[in-house]
Amino acid sequence: MSKEGSTLLELNNLNAIPNNEPLEAAEPPPQKVRSRLSRLKFRRADFIHQRQKLLIISLILLDICLFILARLFMERKAHFGAEFVKSGHGLGKILIFAFFQLTSILISIFLFKRLTSIHINDRIKRKFKYSKTIITVFTLIWIFLTHLTWIFYNVSIPSDFFFPVLCFLALGAYIHCAIFLVLFFLIERITNFLPTKIFILQSKTFHTLTAVGLAFLLTIQGHISTLQSPTLKHLNIAIKNLPVEFENFSVILVSDIHAGPTTGKKRVEEIVEVINNADGDVVAIAGDLVDGYVDYIGDRIRPLENIKSKYGTYVALGNHEYIHENVDHWIKFFRTSLNLTVLINSAVVINRGKEELCLVGVDDFFTASANVKGHKMDAEKALSECPTNVSATILMEHQPNGVASVLKTIEKIQKRVDLILAGHTHAGQMFIVWPIGYLMNHFFYGLYKYPPSGVQIYVSSGVNYWGPPIKMFPSLCEIVKIQLHRDLSNN
């Protein structure tokens, strides 16, 4: 046998290595090498972090550009804009869709990073081995359900189907959580400059858990509010020089039904029952009846044809009648299928004896800026249909910011208007967005009096909600019975 062969046999024989000669351990790399590797890892991590930041900033800038383009596209007087708003198709709709989806993606990235970076201590890790995985899966499912919501406006789904409700509840919790997390993020950044560390102000894990907890708590509480029957409120209004013929004349105000993915036929039937039990002289629906297409949700609002009143049911259009379907399709459906009188910059005169009351409907404030063929907010034209010596004038305009425009018109043309009825704001709908709604509207909720002309304005919180099936309190799902009086001394 060769020398090399015998050496190999010896190496394969375990006994060939003496017990008193231990194997030498591999030498660790020198300190310089370790330090260099550490620096390389840090630089790589920093490079990736900087690239991520750059990507996020780029997406935010792109999102802002999409929003500006969408606004310009809707408001410009080019034929593209007209066709988009009129038919619900075209580049404008694509831009708006892209803006909202990109905004949602940015929020989802932020929410995902916060939730998956929750610090879990060793004791919990030992007890719940897959806690990190559970959090990650929960977050992904939550985000997925939220991003599904837009689909339900564009497909046919059964009325009162539970899955869209689940997705929109996920959206409600998502909105709450995102706003809370942004507020906490700002607090963390500001308090970083403090000389001492304060746990309650600087703990990301504490803030994230608090945001998630509050989000789901407020979502559940808000959803319970919407499951109650609509609240019938009573409001007495004094009209100057109101003739005795119209004493106790009653108007049932309804707004913001929002029949759509989460508001089905049963809820509309419930609303009609409350309206009919209120036994009003006139029913005034101040916009936002629907969220979707006639073919998909027309059947959900069919119970409205069963509304009973002495002098009829009148509708003013809201902004949501314009968002999905060609608005003229909805107008035709309201008139022919539901026997509703749609007032578009027009008026109707109600007679009692020799006295007259004028009920006016103005096209939605949305049409003042958007280029919608055949539709433009025109309070002057609408009021011109009221007789000169009318006993009282009640005007419907869906948006409070549109009401501000109407008030300017009233002062300009010196026409009598006693009461304006509006909706749109939902009285904030959710605690977390209430301040935003309050700041964005000239009139927010409840009864107002405009001193220059003495016009009274009532802004309803609406009978339903938009989007997430959430309302702050059950009383904010309201139908209002307004009674007119010469004075309120006995009322």
Image: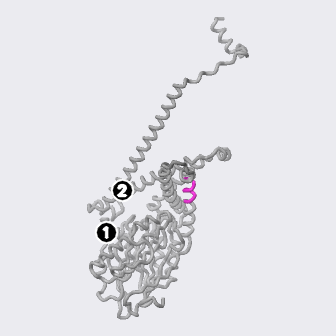
Q: Position of residue 248 (x, y in %)?
A: 45, 89
Q: Position of residue 79 (x, y in %)?
A: 27, 61
Work out which quarter of the rendered image holds the N terminus and state it.
top right
Q: Position of residue 469 (x, y in %)?
A: 51, 66
Q: Is residue 423 visible?
A: yes
Q: Amino acid at mark 2?
A: Phe
Q: Amino acid at mark 1?
A: Ala
Q: Earlier in the sequence, mark 2 or mark 1?
A: 2
Q: Name the magenta segment's main secondary structure.
A: helix
In-image side of 110 versus 130 (left or right): left
In-image side of 114 versus 317 (left or right): right
Residue at figure coordinates x 50%, y 65% from the top left: 431
Query: Alpha-carbon distance for marks 2 and 1?
Result: 19 Å
Residue situated furthest front in the rendering: 195
In-image side of 384 versus 305 (left or right): left
Callout 2: SS: helix
- Asked whether 73 or 60 is in front, the reply is 60
User: Which residue carries the number 1 mark?
Assistant: 368
Q: Is residue 147 visible?
A: no
Residue at figure coordinates x 47%, y 66% from the top left: 434
Q: For label 1, count other residues whose C-alpha is less than 10 Å away and answer few (under 14), some (14-19) or many (20+).
A: some
Callout 1: SS: helix
Q: Is residue 212 magenta?
A: yes
Magenta span of residues:
207-214
Q: As displayed, is residue 384 above or below residue 26?
A: below
Q: For label 2, count other residues whose C-alpha is less than 10 Å away and answer few (under 14), some (14-19) or many (20+).
A: some
In-image side of 387 versus 216 (left or right): left
- Asked whether 71 or 5 is in front, the reply is 71
Q: Position of residue 175 (x, y in %)?
A: 49, 59
User: Which residue carries the number 2 mark?
Assistant: 67
